[in-house]
Image: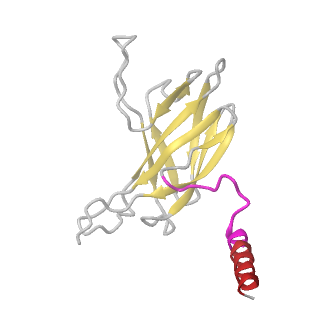
Amino acid sequence: MTRYAASAAMALALGVSTACSSDDPEPDSTNRGGGETDGQTSVENVFIAPAYAIDCSLQVDAPAQLSFTAVNDSSTEAETLSEITSPAAERVEIDAPAGALEIAPESSIAAGQPVENVEDADAPDRPFRSFMFGLDDSAEPGKSIPVTFTFERAGDITLQVAVDACPNQSE
């Protein structure tokens, strides 16, 4: 009788663990952007760093910095980032010098990262930045909001982007 009880318990445990599994082999990740891709164009390491007051309350009237890396895996065609939008923000602005949003084949661009132009001594070493203005109540620290990156070739890539928590939280 104990052999039957052990078999029944094993079958029950197997059934419960199977029921808890997911059919989705690549679940969405909100950990720093999740690496969404559309063919040969991808957006990685995406996060929102809002402005915080000294008491760690979110400053809704201040812009939040949007950091990301856009990658062009095509070996022959350039890609261009044309717009960033979010239903959780009134607007998203990209502060970039001319040509900074064009991604050469097999390369990437990164918002907020330093730029070193070693091939052209006269080229500006200025990073480009992006900011979200007028965030709504859904942009809470530790939560994610949808952000859409629009590219000339790939079109829209939408992903859930994490809102960073206050870096100076007191214990």
Is 1 a magenta residue?
A: no
Question: Taking 123 as reference, is 102 left or right?
Answer: right
Q: Residue at coordinates 35% horizontally, 31% vertically from top-left?
A: 114
Residue 165 lies in quadrant: bottom left
Q: Residue at coordinates 47% horizontally, 61% vertically from top-left?
A: 135
Determine whether 26 is above or below 168 in the image: above
Residue that lies at the very extreme toward the bottom in this rendered image? 1
Question: Taking 153 as reference, is 102 left or right?
Answer: left
Number of numbered discs visible in the structure rendering: 0
Is 18 a magenta residue?
A: yes
Residue 106 lies in quadrant: top right
Instruction: Point out the image quarter for the N terminus.
Output: bottom right
Q: Residue 132 at what x, y percent from top left?
A: 46, 51
Determine whether 91 is above or below 153 in the image: below
Q: Residue at coordinates 62% horizontally, 22% vertically from top-left?
A: 78
Residue interval drawn in magenta: 17-31
Q: Residue 128 at what x, y percent from top left?
A: 41, 34
Determine whether 11 is above or below 138 in the image: below
Q: Nearer the viewer, residue 112 or 14?
A: 14
Instruction: Point out the image quarter for the C terminus.
Output: bottom left
| Main secondary structure found in the magenta portion | loop
Q: Residue 130 at what x, y percent from top left?
A: 44, 43
- Coloring scheme of the render? secondary structure
Question: Taking 8 as reference, is 161 left or right?
Answer: left
